[in-house]
Image (spheres, helix red, strand yellow):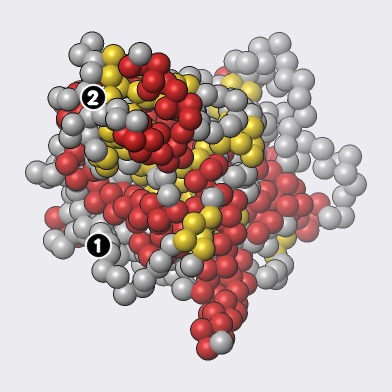
Amino acid sequence: MAEVTKLIHKYLRHDKKFPHVWCPGCGIGIMLGALIRAVDRIGYEKDEIVLVSGIGCSGRLPVYVDFNTLHTTHGRAITFATGVKLAKPRLKVIVIMGDGDAVAIGGNHFIHAARRNIDITTLILNNNIYGMTGGQNSPTTPYGMRSTTTTYSNIEQSFNISELAVTAGAAFVGRGTVYHARLLDNLMEKAFLKKGFSVVEIISHCHTQYGRQNRLGTAVEMMEQQRDQAITVEKATKMKSEELKDRIVIGVLVDKELPVYQDEYEKIQERAKRQSKMNDKL
Amino acid sequence: MLLQGNEAVAEGALRAGCRFFGGYPITPATEISEVLSVRLPQVGGTFIQMEDEIASLGAVIGASLAGVKSMTATSGPGFSLMQENLGLAIIAEVPCVIVNVMRGGPSTGLPTFPAQGDVMQARWGTHGDHPIIVLSASTVRECYDMTIYAFNLSEKFRTPVILLIDEVVGHMREKMVVDDEEPIEIFNRVKPTMPPEWYIPYEDTPSGVSPMANFGEGYRYHVTGLTHDVRGFPTSRPDEIGPFISRLHRKISSHFAEIQVAEFFRTDDAEITIIAYGCVARSAKRAMIEAREKGLKVGLLKLNTLWPFMRIAVEKVLQTSKILIVPEMNMGQISREVKRVNRGVARVITLNKVDGTIITPMEILDRIQEAVS
């Protein structure tokens, strides 16, 4: 354990930016830990990494880590990441978003980045609620649950973020929970190494807002619910869809080879250069 | 060669060193995208058509942070969407150029007709108290020159610069000589030279502009849209917020001489001065010439920098002029500024047109003759 702590501290801006803003018991720290462990395992230089975030609890994550960090506008993190990656393809660009950030205000950017297959990794912390603003209904708040803007009951259907990513054409999609920390390490490592648009959905708990309003218990109790609800992809494929209701399918959902935007654009650049040389000769 | 204003913007951008363009199709700015989609890959640059204008400016800012001169081009509806990330570029001090080829508004308005209705939006469109640089152009050659100038100012002052042209100037074709050998001043952002551990990304300097490190060059720091301290970390301390916001304004307000450009035509003895910009300045020049032929002492002040508003130029023409005529293709946006500077010294006469047609030299001449009679 001490080794892991040392490793984490190697990547933190601990002398400058702590204490952090998150509630005690929040799952976001586990996500950050997994991110750092995966980065360390692959052996990226700190300078190589650009960590981009949007707005919300997850948006505050980059400031604590000693990478090139960029905290942007609500839902737009992927657009900035696209610019960074295309301008300097040697950088490893990682985007951190929450559920509201990624699929409400940023939903359009999310599906288009997946469609284009831009070589960036997107980590989405899904805690079913807008936490920072005080517990409002998000696009992943399940039907029938409560929030401060659905005090009677949520009557909307919720998004399945990973399935949305698969449908939009992401090259890699994985899902884990903050209970399954080691799975997160592995999913992130795979996602970072994947050439193309990779997504890891991290199911987390907001015991302060979502848990309290829906009487789901403490942070630990909510993590135990994640454990009980989780089912691996391998097992899930053998089950009927009715049986999978209220279950969280974890593991690698998609891992496929697709033409990567930057590779394709490099070909365009070569073609354009050849053509302009020919024009010069004429 | 015979070039369109929009094409000249694209060529000017390339000459300035622009190597990234993120945009979304919109009339009457689309030609800038089309030309750069062909030209950028030829010079090793990148063109990407994004899913909307919010994304376009996001990508532009990201590319600039990675060290590449970047721009986007749009028109009113897209410019409205860009206001969000424009604010981020201002607070995070990221150089970039936004070209707005103005069309009639509000909303979808008049997609293929000219207007000058976005002058105040360019100044105040994004929320919060902020400085901004806004330039304009009246000729195809000016589209080229002002685009280069926009890049230079954005790099020099670490700020987004907006080039406001209009549908007439964007689509008009004129002869323009482009000489690649012609010496043109190109300014590149000042980068830090100190060791990374000494680098303070938002440190105050005599000019108010801090050296800018690009991502991936060893100076790891935090960039945020939150109000931040000199290290770039979010702050809620009044003693850090105040100086930061003041510096943002000071870096522009203490360099008016480097930012503000205007042209004076026969204003030395002018009793009447026309103040105009964009395509209207062309009609104004014709009207001035015809008025002079009639023996009227008319001059023209052509504003190339719209914001920060060039108080000094208006004060200069006020030394001789008793009448100022401000023709604009809006309900009176720059004329408000002229009146503010004038403070009752001269008669300020407005000439506003918002029907999608240009203001003709005749209309301006009529207004001059009305004024003197």
Say whether residue B93 is visible. Answer: no
Measured as percent of width and height from the top left, residue A151 is found at 66, 12
Q: Residue at x 26, y 69 (%)?
A: B183
The 10 Å Cα crowd at callout 1, few under 14, some 14 to 19, many 20 or more, is: few
**Is residue A21 shown above or below A263?**
above
Q: Residue at x 19, y 45 (%)?
A: B258
Q: Residue at x 63, y 48 (%)?
A: B25
Measured as percent of width and height from the top left, residue A278 is found at 56, 86
Say whether residue B16 is visible. Answer: yes
What subunit carries mark 1? B
Figure disc tally: 2
Q: Which mark is residue B218?
A: none
> Which residue is under mark 1?
B185
| Residue nearest the viewer, comparing B244 with A221 | B244
The 10 Å Cα crowd at callout 2, few under 14, some 14 to 19, many 20 or more, is: many
Secondary structure of the residue carrying numbered label 2: loop
| Residue nearest the viewer, comparing A22 with B326 | B326
Secondary structure of the residue carrying numbered label 1: loop
> Which residue is under mark 2?
B271
**Is residue B365 shown above or below B199?**
above
- Amino acid type indicated by mark 2: Glu
Q: Residue at x 40, y 16 (%)?
A: B370
What subunit carries mark 2? B
Give the mark, 1 or 2, whose residue is nearer the N terminus. 1
State the quadrant of the C terminus of chain A.
bottom right
Q: Residue furthest bottom?
A: A281
